[in-house]
Amino acid sequence: MSTTGRDLARRLWLLLTLGAVTTLVLFGAYRGVHDDTVPLASSSTPGILAVDTAKNALQRAHAAVDSNETAKDTTGEFHTQMSVAHQSIAVAASANVTGLADRHTLQTVTGLITVYSTWAERAGRETDPLLRGAYLHYAEQGRDDIIARLDALRHEQMAVAREQASFPWPLRLVWGAALALCVVLCAVLVETQRFVRHRLRSAVHPPLLAATFLCASGAAVLGWFTVRAHAAMGDSLAELHVARPASEIPETGADVKRYMADAGFWAALSEWVFVGGVVLMVLMLAGLWPRISEYRFKVPR
Amino acid sequence: MRRPRLRTLGVVSVCLTLLAAGAVAGVHWARGWTGSVTVLANWGGSEKEQFERAVERFEAEHRIDVVYQGSSALSQVLAADLASGTQPDVVVLPGPGELTVYAAEGRLKPLDGLFEAGAYDDVWTPKVAGEDGQKRTYWLPVKTGLKSMVWHAGDLPKDGTTGGAGIARTAGEPDRWCLAMESGATSGWPGTDWVEDILLQQAGPQVYEQWATGGLSWTDARVRKAWQTWGEMVGAGDRTRVGRILKDDFGQDCPRGSAEHQGSFRASHWQGVEGDFVHSAEVIPGARAGSDRWEVSGDLAAMLNATDEARKLIRFLADPGTRLPDFTVNKKAPAPESHGDPLKRRIGSILRDSERQLCWDASDVMPPALRDAFHQAVLRFLVAPGELEGRLQALEALSDGGRPTLPVCGTT
């Protein structure tokens, strides 16, 4: 008695199971990397650069009030820089990189900036050199406190960014498993193709061929995007590693934006992994089910 | 022996995987926080560490993350937080003045029922009017301090009979005072402490309370005398010396042979030179006899968001078993006599002695705008003592207007 029908059914079940598992694992592996690309591009980077901007603005503001050139009116520059500092703190707060502690720190920094500004303005108005010196000293102490807090915050933000850009061993393991499953799936598809051709003496089965191509090309494309995303995140991290002076911040922001320009597209592809998985399984069914049906109707006769 | 079937192995593998995943999830859950409570205070350095050590047990027992922020710009940070509706759950403010205002505005949540009412004396936890006019308890003293103290090194005799300069003689020499005004947003407060204490020791608690609550003019002769006494004691107007005083940090090291008018928080510093303290009445010219009047301070915890986590933290802070930073005035806590450190034992005993008259640091009772102006006035007075009258009139102008009142002096 012919075992072809049973062998085909067994292969179909194996292919469907492998297809489902591969889709799930590949989805998990892809999301594991790309879930962090958008937050790195749209939250961590602006948050970190906003902290750098606030620091620079405070230093520039203090340089304006600390100027020995008493004849030169620098109040305009001071207020401009204070405004930049406030706006940057607001941007850093909306980026919300490290969560609750981050917001709490930024609220405190906002209060400290108010105190700093008060002392600096008092110094600017004061005519007694002794009091002016004391007020400037208090302002300096306040500024140092603010900068120390912003440095600590940046350190925590960088830790979050590093984690986002990292490729830890569990993720490597999942990617290894996903690629191995893809190879196995492709091998089983090729073997099924050969089996069908040998047993049924038919030519190439287009649905099975398409499934093989979809599996191989899908894995390659997802892998390639992941390699690119990982490299882009690494490059972005290198840009953010050191606190930048005010003149370099726009350029740094632009560089990171360029590296991560496709982050949204890469991340959006994760949903298509499921669509691809469903198409893959439909192709398998389309390739094998008609043959199995033929054998099912033959058996009772 | 039969080898297990492939299916059996599969089932066992799945079960083991599920078990491992469950164990990992369980450990993660056990280690994770169930909630958080944000706390804003003005502690930094060792005080912050002490508080964080104290709440470690709370975090471990309740699995609630205590997110602490400390800043000397506490008032400004809190005002900004309240304005934007992002206030911390719990705030710890030094003194009841600002809290009284916030309670009257309905910003604070009542603490009644969260701790035993009789555990603290009324001077520490008075009932004050809320937004609806009803009197409730709105704060809890977490850490208290003794003021009206003059610190000196151990080798400085109190009476000068052993040949060296005694503490009284030292106090008469402006250069021997260890004095520093820098303290971030609140720079100037060591000077306000001086003026307040001199008034308390010269004029007594009744006058002091009247002045602190707006019932006595800043231009009153007794208040003016307190300022002038301070100016003479520390050498106000000596520009070289004052220039240094203005910029020095209040937590600086004091030279040996000097004296310092500071609170009990300086105990650990002076212990390094086997230091001791005397009541400030012993060195303040024109002070009334007796040493039963002490200025005190207290870091008071109030609740701004009545979350479960915040309530649990307040209960924890009020628990007599909680080891809070020195000094607690919780009557159920171990008596100060059990303190191993004799200096701290003495301070703790004064704070909990029912015979003493304890008066809140007056500037901590005043509204924030007046308190800040007082700090400013002190700095300016040091530089230009001749402009005192103008400064007092400016303070009096700010002092006008009704303000919520609360008991300033009382016995424990």
Image (cartoon, coloured by chain):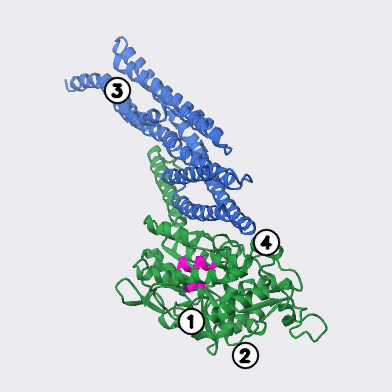
- At mark 2, the secondary structure is loop
Inter-mark Cα distance, 3 to 2: 102 Å
Nearest to the observer: residue B303 or residue B407? B407
- At mark 1, the secondary structure is helix
Inter-mark Cα distance, 4 to 2: 34 Å
Quarter residue B150 falls in: bottom right
Q: Does the magenta stretch include residue A216?
A: no
Q: In this view, does B351 lie above or below A98?
A: below
Rendered-image quadrant of the N terminus of chain A:
top left
Q: Which residue lies furthest to the left in this view?
A: A301
Inter-mark Cα distance, 1 to 3: 90 Å
Mark 1: few/some/many CA within 10 Å (<14, 14-19, 20+): many
Residue where numbered disc 3 is placed: A284
Inter-mark Cα distance, 3 to 4: 87 Å
User: The residue under label 2 is which amino acid type?
Assistant: Ala
Rendered-image quadrant of the C terminus of chain A:
top left
Q: Is residue B247 above or below residue B217?
A: above
Residue where numbered disc 4 is placed: B243
Mark 2: few/some/many CA within 10 Å (<14, 14-19, 20+): few
Residue where numbered disc 1 is placed: B209
User: The residue under label 3 is which amino acid type?
Assistant: Met
Expressed as whole percent of the image width and height from the top left, the position of residue B350 reads: 58, 84
Q: In this view, does B24 lie above or below B125?
A: above
Q: Is residue A94 visible?
A: yes
User: Mark 4 or mark 1, which is nearer the start of the sequence?
Assistant: 1
Which marked residue is nearer to the observer: mark 4 or mark 2? 4
